[in-house]
Image: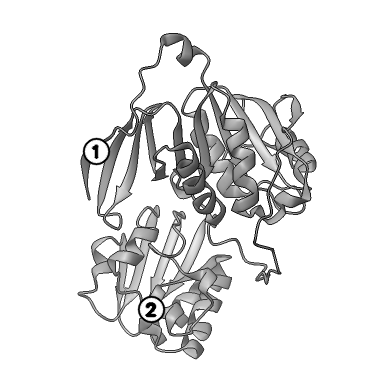
Amino acid sequence: MFSVGVRSCVGPVVRRPANFRLASTLVFLEANKDGKVAQSSLSALSAAEQLGNPIKALLAGSNSTEAAKQLKLTVGASLVDQIIVANNEVYDNYLPEAVTPLCLELLKEKEFSHFVVASSAVGKNLLPRVGALLDYQPICDVTKIVDPTTFVRPIYAGNALATVQCTQEKKLVSVRASSFPACSAGSFDAPTLEAPQVEIAELGVAWESENLVKSARPDLGSAAKVVSGGRGLKNKETFDKLITPLADSLSAAIGATRAAVDSGFCENSLQIGQTGKVIAPDLYIGVGVSGAIQHLAGMKDSKVIVAINNDQEAPIFQVADFGLVGDLNEIVPELTKKLTK
């Protein structure tokens, strides 16, 4: 991996020192129906603190007041000086056609120099719309904040890192959750204010339903341990037979390559890679994973990488900390047995 310097100069603006003193960061936070803020949003909040500006956190939806209470009681975020809540069911499910006008109304304030979201499905829907309507270029999938105007982001499927300097008056940033730790446990005291009322035109879209996968396993995006299966497992029966017991023995989340997902070994939500989820667990075990560049882009930041494959020339061994070469049907059951003991 190498770094390249890229300078982003969309609409350069000369800012007076007074504007820097008044700068604030607006962070959009996602919360579930129980009022718990998403792990990816806590990472976005942690990233926003690195900018050094006072932070205003935005919560939207009918559960936003409860989410604000839980946030203040469970999260150590000293730079948050205000929580803005938009208590309206129209923002439930975060349809971007509804949330975008709310963000635009807030970002009209000159005090906001940065707008930060998590690089989640919601963030990826929201940020481009905000950027287009404000006529600003978003900086997406940031993995490192150098200073308030300079950011590092992956390009070319993660094979290179671009250092981007942004001279826009407002920096619109999405951050890769796996690259920033979630805010630590704690509490803070900040006033909660109601968001301005925004007139929302007829959306033209409607939320029909959702089919959520319920599991006792850790969430793949935030799990400390992940066991991933690839095309080398041949079929769904072998995937379930080998991957599930191994993951159970480690209390780990289950993931998969795109090839495994496309072959029907498991559901789409378990896909890891450039077009799936990007993870950085403490332990990643790849079983029958060859190590295609698209998959490596989603897991190469793992602390410890273990590869199990019968092909000793598989690319994944180039990034693995530990490798086992041999028959999966013999190695994995034996490993599971020893871990269970």
State whether residue 232 is above or below residue 120.
below
The residue indicated by pointer 2 is 259
Earlier residue among tags 2 and 1: 1
Name the disc covering residue 39, or none.
none
74 over 279 or under it: above or below: above
Q: How is the image coloured?
A: one colour
Q: Which residue is more in the foreground, 330 or 132?
A: 132
Residue 341: tell me if it is visible. Answer: no
Quadrant of residue 228 in the image?
bottom left
Q: Which residue is mark 1?
A: 6
Q: Which percent across, then down, holds residue 83?
A: 69, 31
Q: Residue furthest top?
A: 18
What residue appears at the point 63 percent right and 55 percent down from the top-left corner?
A: 95
Q: Farthest residue toward the front?
A: 201
Give the CA separation, mark 2 to mark 1. 33 Å
Give residue 74's quadrant in the image: top right
CB-based contact (under 8 Å), mark 2 and mark 1: no
Residue drawn at point x = 49 percent, y = 36 percent: 47
Kind of residue at badge 1: Val
Find residue 191 and report its image quarter: top right
Q: Amino acid at mark 2?
A: Ala
Q: Is residue 279 visible?
A: yes
Q: Is residue 303 left or right of residue 86?
A: left
Is residue 91 placed above or below 234 in the rendered structure?
above
Check disc 1: other Cα within 10 Å, few if <14, some if 14-19, many if 20+: some
**Residue 121 drawn above or below residue 19:** below
Give how far across and how far down residue 309 sits, in percent: 31, 77
Would residue 307 appear left or right of 177 to someone viewing this image? left
Residue at 20% over, 41% down = 4
